[in-house]
Amino acid sequence: MLTKELNETLTRVGPGTPMGELMRRYWHPVAGSAELDENPVKKVRLLSEDLVLYRDKSGTLGLMDEPCPHRRVSMEYGIPEPEGLRCPYHGWVFNHEGRCLEQPAEPWDSTFKDRVTTTSYPVQELGGLVFAYLGPQPAPLLPRFDLLVWDNVVRQVGLTLLPCNWLQCMENSLDPVHVEWLHGYYMDYVWSRKGQGQGQQFRARHKKIGFDRFEHGIVKRRVVEGNTEEDDPWRVGHPIVFPTILRVGGSGVYRFDCRVPVDDNQTLHITYSVYRPGYRCHPRSQCRSMTCRSSTATGSS
């Protein structure tokens, strides 16, 4: 069991905290690219910082401190311009580097704007996600993980805000045995109450579990009844990529579960599913896999 002091050290992610400073050395997904299609400005909270993500009219992404440094109006209501985001209150414009480009009420020869900045952070787009980096410069390369860069696939992004800290979510990723009870026994109970019969996908009991360290984290392995160590759940396993990613899947359906630390008490759970056309684990009418049911709802293959 963790002590209260160690638990607080591991779960507090604000600026200046040990885990907050460590987490700021990594890129974190903060939104799906498609979210900015309908509204190019989105408020986000990451590592206990309130920020505004936007895409300006030139297509450049920016991430800045939420309040305008002038009169503290929320830039969530900002107006995208060809180069930056304009405050709706007095029209000050800030670019993706946090530099003030325009102050409409100042004299034409004023240099005041050249001395005004706002906090801004690097953002990059990859595989339908927008990633942010809040740490010291130079920023590391954004990792080109396989699911993010595969060609000829269908991608689906789901976002859920969870009322718990990031460590509670990641602890679940390292727990193999809950699968047969939560995703199996309990799920069978839920489906039976809905009159859907008894599903069998996860009913096999665990015979063996194992963990191995690798250069990016830990590989979780399992052998269930009816399988051997030659099968993928043991031979390949499920990598947990430090600090916040679990990779699962096979047979044409793969997934990242990203647990993004919003603050000390909230986590953004991003489900990033990738479908390779031509694969299907079951006839869809018979499959109770949440992945297949989700792809049916969206028309994915």
Image: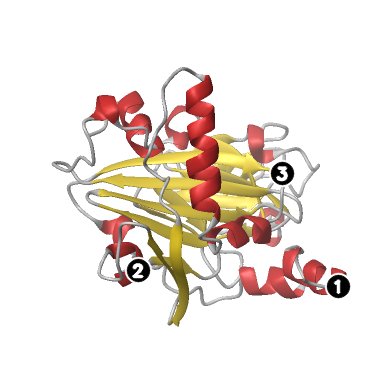
Mark with earlier residue (3, 1):
1
Q: Which quarter of the image is occupied by the C terminus? A: top left
Q: Is residue 146 visible?
A: yes
Instruction: Identify which residue is drawn at 20% across, 40% down.
Output: 280
Q: Quadrant of residue 2?
A: bottom right
Residue 40 percent coordinates (x, y): 49, 35
> What element does badge 2 sit on?
helix
Position of residue 199 relative to residue 193, above or below, is: below
User: Label 2 vs label 3: CA separation?
Assistant: 32 Å
Of circles 2 and 3, the one toward us is 2
Q: Which circle marks residue 295 in the picture?
A: none
Q: Amino acid at mark 1?
A: Glu
Q: Which circle marks residue 234 in the picture?
A: 2
Q: Which circle marks residue 163 in the picture?
A: 3
Q: Mark 2 and mark 1 in contact (Cβ < 8 Å)?
A: no
Going by the image, does 201 lie left or right of 39? left
Going by the image, does 141 lie left or right of 226? right
